Every structure is written in C-alpha cells, then in structure tokens.
Image (cartoon, rainbow, N blue to C red):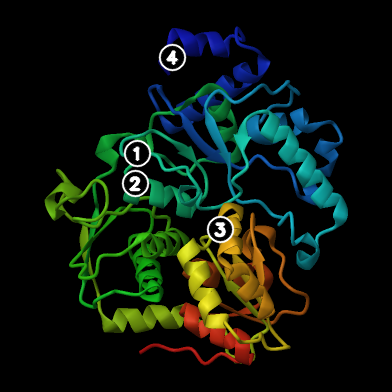
C-alpha cells in the first residue's frame, strides 16, 4: 500500500503505540482487500462498549485491554488516547434504564456504565443507536465514513450519498484513532453505480410495503446494487430506513438508487452510469404477497411479545404508537417494547408520548433491541413486529414464531393478545 508520510509515521510509532497498532491493522486490512491506499475519514461509527459476559476476563485487565483486543486486534495492551476524529458508539446490548426488565445481571450494567465512562473520556459519542443519522450524525454527499451496522451503512451510502463499506469493530476502532480507512469498495466512485433494475408494478406507499419491497429486492440482487424505477409515492426517511434494513437482511445490499430521490441518481441513466442492468426484476401484487408470506414464521395467533423499532423509531413513529395506545391497555398475556434512541426518548418524554405508552403498560427502551441483546421476556413463544429485519432474524436467534405486519397490526395484537394482521 502507498502510505503518506504521516501514515508512515503513525505506523512507525511516532504518535504512540495505539496509533501504531491501528495503522498496522489498517495496512493488513487494506492489503487483504487490494486497496492501493488509505483515505481520510472524520466520521466513524462502531461498537466499542463492553457489556457482555464474554468480555469479563478482558475487563479484569482494564478497558485499555478491551479496546486493544477487540477494537485493534492487538495482543499487546496499549494505552488508548482520545479519538483523532468524530467517533460514535452504535447500538449496545443493554438499556441503561430498563436493564431489569431485560433480565440483565447487575454486574453487566455496572460494567457497561464503567465502559461508557471510559469511552466518553476518549471522546467517543455514546449515541447508542443503529440510526446515528437520526440523532445528529448526518454525513454529507461524498464524505468518506467508517461505519458498522448494515442498516446504517445502506442509508449512509444511498440516501445521504456518503461513502462507507460495512466495517467491523476492529477497522472502526483503528479508524477512530487514525482518521484513516482503506480506499476500496464503496469509497470508489466506479463501484457505486447500479447493477440491477427493479420495476415497480405496485404503488409502494406505506412503511410495511417498503419493508416488503426491501426484503424482496435483497433476495433478488443479494450483494449487488439495485435501482428502483417507477416509484409513484415519494418515500420519507422512515420508509427508506425500513426498506434499507430489509434489503440488507435478506441480501447483503449496501447501496441502492431511486432516481429522483436518492443522493446519486437524478435519473435512471445517472444511477447506472456506464453500466447496463445485469437483470431486470418486477415487483407487483404477486411478489408483494409472496414476500409477505415469507416473512410470517408463525402459525399460533396467540402473541406473547410485540417489538417495535428496528431500526430505531423516529419521533414520528413513537408519536404514532402513543396515539394508537391512547386510553388502551396492553393485554395481560403480552408485552410491548418500543425501541428508540435515548435522545429521541427524551423528546418523547417531553411531548407526553412516553407517559401515554407507559400508561398502556408498554415499555420504551433505548440503546438496544432484542436482536442485538438476544433478550426477550421469559417464556415468549410468539412475537409480532413491524420490522422485516426483525422478522428475518429474531425467530432464528430466539427460537420463536414471528408475525410481521403494520404498526397498527402490531399495536392491536398487543392490546388483544391475538394476531389479526393481514394484507389489503
């Protein structure tokens, strides 16, 4: 790899052992993927927090040891300085306020809080959400980033037009210390053009249908770059968020284009650039119904647990849930968890949404979700969710049956204890 003088100095240890270890990791990573150089980044979003039983033995050596081993892939324990660039903590495994409801051991919440204090002293922003763009981290078109989390990456690349690959704990840990990431994959302009064309024969409009469409496209194109044509209803952030999360779950989609809507596609021709579509897929009523049915893994209509907010809910989504629950009570045999970033939870509290939701018997959680924490209420057999991503992952992760549907369907199931959702 071609390194600048500053990068060579970091690698040689001129700026300390931590940056030397970080540069060593980035060079090895870059060489493995065939990158010719590194690129500067001032926007890192990764996983730094220590809050699982598996890291207890490392925590006993100190949090420098945790960062060295898990975020730098280093056997040597190095002293970790302040981050060199803006660095953000993504979603974690424990809700700092509702850890008892999650069934978390008190020693783990203590460990998490100590970890957060350590990271905060090193200027890692503890946003603790899978949607950093909802709480202030909004990179601009063309900005090079180093982000983890598949649903965040696809939104970053597609909707915002910033540039990132799906990174890991180690590469983001190294990027935060150096402000560098290998220049390959979606950092290269030529790798961002569309590959497959999706023709919509059905007017996709609400959030549920955008989730279904994303799940369908992920299955069709796998890790390629779809271009969605003939979109009749202009989607908002919420719909694009759920679409991207679903496409990244059923496939490995890291970028998509919607002509006239996403950042790098004013037209179909601009979306494909020098490429021609490898294949054209059509999405109509039949594909919509078939995909919806794939997302249903349940047969028992008695629902134990309803999970809303994957990716994390926006304030508009929390407001809708509060309105649907106003004056209602959650069924005695069900539990409803609503997930949102802690910054948005504070707004919801000021607006009275939190009180309305809690008066109904539901819980508003932050910092985590069941797929990350792998924690559900005890005895859960059947879940319901408005997230195609959760409908894809949670049944396998938690060995439960799963229903997928609209927010209204899910709230109704929470109130009645029975799944009555369907498609119109």
Q: Using the image, tell me which numbered label, if any, was put on residue 140.
A: 1
Q: Earlier in the sequence, mark 4 or mark 2?
A: 4
Residue that carries the numbered disc 4 in the rendered image = 3
Q: How many labels does the image show?
A: 4
Q: Using the image, tell me which numbered label, if any, was put on residue 372.
A: none
Whole-percent x, y for residue 141 in the image: 31, 39
In the depicted view, which residue is nearer to us: 237 or 273?
237
Residue 120 sits above or below residue 375 on the image: above
Q: Is residue 401 left or right of residue 136?
A: right
Residue that carries the numbered disc 3 in the rendered image = 347
Q: How far apart are marks 2 and 3 (CA)?
A: 24 Å
Q: Is mark 4 on a helix, strand or loop?
A: loop
Identity of the residue drawn at 64% across and 34% down: 71
Q: Which of marks 4 and 3 is nearer the N terminus?
A: 4
The C terminus sits in image quarter: bottom left
Is residue 386 among what the camera can see? Answer: no
Q: How far apart are marks 3 and 1 (CA)?
A: 25 Å
Identity of the residue drawn at 51% across and 40% down: 167
Identity of the residue drawn at 59% across and 26% down: 83
Residue that carries the numbered disc 2 in the rendered image = 160
Q: Contact (CB < 8 A) between labels 1 and 2?
A: yes
């Amino acid at each position: 790899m071609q390194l600048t003088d500053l990068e060579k100095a970091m690698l040689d240890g001129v700026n300390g052992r931590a940056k030397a270890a970080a540069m060593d990791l980035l060079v090895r990573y870059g060489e493995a993927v065939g990158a010719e150089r590194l690129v500067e980044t001032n926007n890192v979003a990764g996983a730094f927090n220590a809050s699982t039983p598996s890291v207890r033995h490392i925590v006993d050596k100190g949090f420098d040891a945790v960062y060295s081993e898990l975020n730098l892939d280093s056997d040597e324990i190095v002293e970790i300085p302040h981050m060199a660039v803006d660095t953000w903590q993504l979603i974690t495994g424990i809700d700092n306020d509702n850890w008892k409801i999650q069934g978390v051991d008190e020693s783990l919440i203590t460990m998490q809080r100590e970890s957060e204090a350590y990271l905060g002293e090193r200027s890692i922003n503890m946003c603790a959400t899978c949607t950093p763009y909802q709480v202030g981290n909004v990179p601009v078109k063309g900005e090079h980033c180093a982000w983890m989390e598949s649903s965040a990456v696809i939104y970053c690349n597609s909707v915002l037009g910033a540039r990132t690959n799906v990174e890991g704990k180690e590469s983001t840990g190294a990027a935060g210390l150096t402000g560098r990431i290998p220049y390959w994959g979606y950092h290269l302009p030529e790798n961002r053009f569309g590959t497959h064309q999706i023709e919509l024969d059905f007017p996709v409009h609400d959030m549920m249908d955008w989730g279904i469409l994303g799940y369908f496209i992920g299955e069709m194109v796998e890790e390629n770059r779809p271009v969605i044509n003939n979109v009749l209803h202009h989607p908002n952030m919420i719909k694009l968020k759920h679409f991207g999360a679903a496409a990244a779950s059923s496939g490995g989609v890291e970028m998509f284009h919607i002509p006239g809507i996403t950042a790098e596609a004013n037209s179909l021709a601009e979306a494909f650039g020098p490429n021609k579509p490898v294949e054209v897929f059509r999405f109509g009523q039949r594909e919509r119904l078939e995909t919806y049915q794939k997302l249903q893994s349940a047969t028992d209509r008695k629902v134990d647990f309803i999970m809303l907010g994957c990716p994390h809910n926006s304030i508009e989504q929390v407001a809708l849930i509060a309105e649907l629950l106003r004056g209602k009570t959650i069924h005695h045999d069900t539990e409803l968890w609503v997930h949102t970033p802690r910054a948005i939870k504070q707004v919801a509290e000021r607006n009275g949404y939190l009180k309305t939701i809690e008066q109904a018997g539901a819980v508003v959680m932050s910092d985590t979700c069941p797929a990350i924490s792998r924690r559900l209420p005890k005895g859960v057999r059947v879940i319901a969710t408005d997230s195609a991503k959760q409908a894809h992952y949670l049944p396998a992760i938690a060995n439960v049956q799963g229903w997928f549907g609209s927010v209204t369907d899910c709230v109704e199931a929470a109130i009645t204890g029975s799944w009555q959702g369907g498609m119109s």
